[in-house]
Image: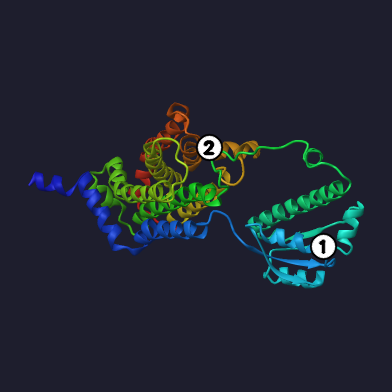
C-alpha cells in the first residue's frame, strides 16, 4: 500500500499530472508548438532571399537624352531596383508613392546632359518612402550610388575628350580605393541578422507566457493545493514536475530552430554546434525560472501574464537585437543584462559568428545558469500563495 501511495505522489506523479493537463488543453499545444512553428515558418519564408530584390521605383526624366537613358538603364540593372514606371511629372510619382505602388522615385532635370558636360553641376533629386525602413534604405543606397557613378562617368568623358589618359582619370576620380569586408554576415542577409535573434526572442516570450499561465491557472481553478499534495507538499518537486514536460517541448522547438538555421540554411557557424545547443537549453530553463520569479512576486494569473508579456516583448528591443546596447541610456543597459535572451544573443555572436574560444563566453553561460537557479530561494513565497489558493481577478 505504501508503494502504491509513493507511486501516486512525488516527482513522477507530478510529471504525469502535468502531461495530462498539457494534452487536455489546446492552448498549451498552440503556444508551445503552434506559435513557435508559425513564427519560424513565417520569418524564414519572409526573408528567404536575404534582402528585398527588385523594389519598384519610378523615374521622371525631363532630359530625354542618351545620357539620361543610359543612367536609367544602369539604375535598373541594380539588383535592388525595378524601374516600374517612367513618368512625366513629380505629381504623378508622388501619388504613386502615396498609394504604395512604388517605394521611391528619381527625377532627372532638364539639360542634364548639357550641364554635366559643361561642368555646371546638374542636380538629381530622389525621394524614398521611409515609412518602409528596409526598402527605403536599400533604395537610398542605390540612388546615391548611381548619382555618384553618373557624376564620375561624366567627368571621365570630359577628361577623355580633353586628352587625359585612363590611369590619370581614375586617380582623380577615386584617389583612395576602399576594400570593404562584411564580417560575420558577408551576404548582408537580413535573415541571418534577424532570425538568429528574433526566433530565440519569440521563444523566450512563449516560455514566459506558458510558464506563468500553467502556474496561475492552478490558482484560478483552485487546484494548487491538489498540485502540492501530488508533489508531497514540496514546492521544489511541484515546480520541477510541472516544468520538465514544458522544458522538453520548448527545448525540442529550440533544437528545431538550430537545425534549420545552421543545418538546413547554413547560417554562419564558426564553432561547435554543441555550444549553441547548450546555450539554447540554458535559455529555455532560464526563461522558465524568470517566469517563476514573476509569479513569486505577483502570484496572479492576470498580472503574471501582463508582466511576462511585457518582458518578452521588450526583450526584442532592449536585448540589443536592433539597437546596440552600449548606445542606450545606462538604466536600459543594466536592464538588458537582466534578460536571459541577452546573454544567449551574446553567446551566439561569440560562438556562431566570431568563433572565439568557449572560455570567452563563460560569463554569459554562468549568467544563464544563475538565472536558472535564481527562483529557488523565492519558492517558499510561491508556496504560501498556492496554499492560500485565492484567485485575484
Q: Where is residue 202 in the image (x, y as percent from the top left)?
A: 47, 52
Determine which quarter of the picture holds residue 108.
Answer: bottom right
Between 312 and 58, the one lying in front of the other is 58
Dot 1 or dot 2: first in sequence order is 1
Q: Is residue 171 left or right of residue 205?
A: right
Q: Where is residue 352 in the image (x, y as percent from the top left)?
A: 46, 38
Please tell me how crowded label 1 is: few (under 14), some (14-19), or many (20+) other residues with Cα within 10 Å. Answer: many
| Residue occupying the point 43% across, 53% down | 206
| Residue occupying the point 33% across, 48% down | 387
Determine which quarter of the picture holds residue 133.
Answer: bottom right
Q: Position of residue 366 (x, y in %)?
A: 43, 31
Furthest toward the left, the residue is 1
Give the CA separation, mark 1 to mark 2. Answer: 50 Å
Furthest toward the top, the residue is 359
Please tell me how crowded label 2 is: few (under 14), some (14-19), or many (20+) other residues with Cα within 10 Å. Answer: some
**Residue marked by disc 1:** 108
Tell me the number on the disc at residue 11: none
Q: Nearer the viewer, mark 1 or mark 2?
A: 1
Q: Is residue 187 left or right of residue 20?
A: right
Q: In this view, does 334 lie to the left or right of 145?
A: left
Helix, strand or loop at label 1? It is strand
Asked if one can make out residue 275 in the rendered structure from this viewpoint, the answer is yes
Asked if one can make out residue 129 in the rendered structure from this viewpoint, the answer is no
Colour scheme of the rendered structure: rainbow
**Residue marked by disc 2:** 337
97 vs 132: above or below: below
Amino acid at each position: 500500500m505504501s508503494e502504491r501511495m509513493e507511486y501516486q505522489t512525488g516527482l513522477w506523479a507530478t510529471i504525469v499530472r502535468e502531461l495530462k493537463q498539457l494534452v487536455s488543453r489546446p492552448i498549451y499545444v498552440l503556444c508551445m508548438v503552434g506559435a513557435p512553428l508559425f513564427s519560424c515558418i513565417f520569418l524564414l519564408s519572409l526573408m528567404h532571399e536575404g534582402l528585398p530584390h527588385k523594389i519598384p521605383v519610378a523615374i521622371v526624366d525631363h532630359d530625354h537624352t542618351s545620357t539620361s537613358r543610359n543612367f536609367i538603364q544602369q539604375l535598373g540593372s541594380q539588383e535592388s531596383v525595378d524601374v516600374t514606371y517612367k513618368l512625366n511629372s513629380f505629381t504623378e510619382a508622388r501619388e504613386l508613392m502615396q498609394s504604395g505602388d512604388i517605394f521611391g522615385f528619381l527625377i532627372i532635370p532638364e539639360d542634364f546632359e548639357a550641364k554635366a558636360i559643361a561642368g555646371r553641376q546638374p542636380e538629381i533629386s530622389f525621394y524614398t518612402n521611409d515609412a518602409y525602413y528596409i526598402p527605403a534604405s536599400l533604395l537610398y543606397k542605390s540612388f546615391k550610388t548611381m548619382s555618384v557613378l553618373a557624376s564620375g562617368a561624366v567627368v571621365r568623358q570630359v577628361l577623355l575628350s580633353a586628352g587625359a589618359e585612363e590611369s590619370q582619370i581614375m586617380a582623380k576620380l577615386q584617389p583612395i580605393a576602399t576594400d570593404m569586408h562584411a564580417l560575420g554576415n558577408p551576404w548582408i542577409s537580413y535573415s541571418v541578422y534577424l532570425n538568429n535573434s528574433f526566433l530565440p526572442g519569440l521563444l523566450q516570450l512563449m516560455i514566459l507566457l506558458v510558464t506563468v499561465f500553467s502556474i496561475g491557472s492552478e490558482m484560478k481553478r483552485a487546484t494548487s493545493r491538489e498540485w502540492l499534495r501530488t508533489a508531497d507538499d514540496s514546492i521544489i518537486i511541484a515546480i520541477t514536475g510541472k516544468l520538465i514536460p514544458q522544458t522538453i517541448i520548448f527545448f525540442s522547438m529550440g533544437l528545431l530552430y538550430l537545425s534549420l538555421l545552421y543545418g538546413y540554411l547554413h547560417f554562419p557557424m564558426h564553432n561547435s554546434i554543441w555550444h549553441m545547443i547548450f546555450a539554447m537549453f540554458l535559455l529555455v530553463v532560464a526563461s522558465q525560472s524568470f517566469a517563476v520569479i514573476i509569479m513569486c512576486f505577483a502570484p496572479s494569473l492576470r498580472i503574471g501574464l501582463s508582466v511576462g508579456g511585457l518582458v518578452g516583448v521588450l526583450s526584442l528591443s532592449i536585448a540589443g537585437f536592433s539597437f546596440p546596447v552600449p548606445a542606450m541610456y545606462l538604466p536600459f543597459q543594466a536592464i538588458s543584462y537582466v534578460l536571459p535572451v541577452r546573454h544567449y544573443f551574446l553567446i551566439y555572436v561569440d560562438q556562431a559568428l566570431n568563433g572565439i574560444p568557449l572560455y570567452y563566453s563563460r560569463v554569459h553561460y554562468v549568467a544563464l545558469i544563475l538565472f536558472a537557479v535564481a527562483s529557488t530561494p523565492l519558492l517558499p513565497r510561491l508556496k504560501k500563495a498556492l496554499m492560500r489558493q485565492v484567485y485575484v481577478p
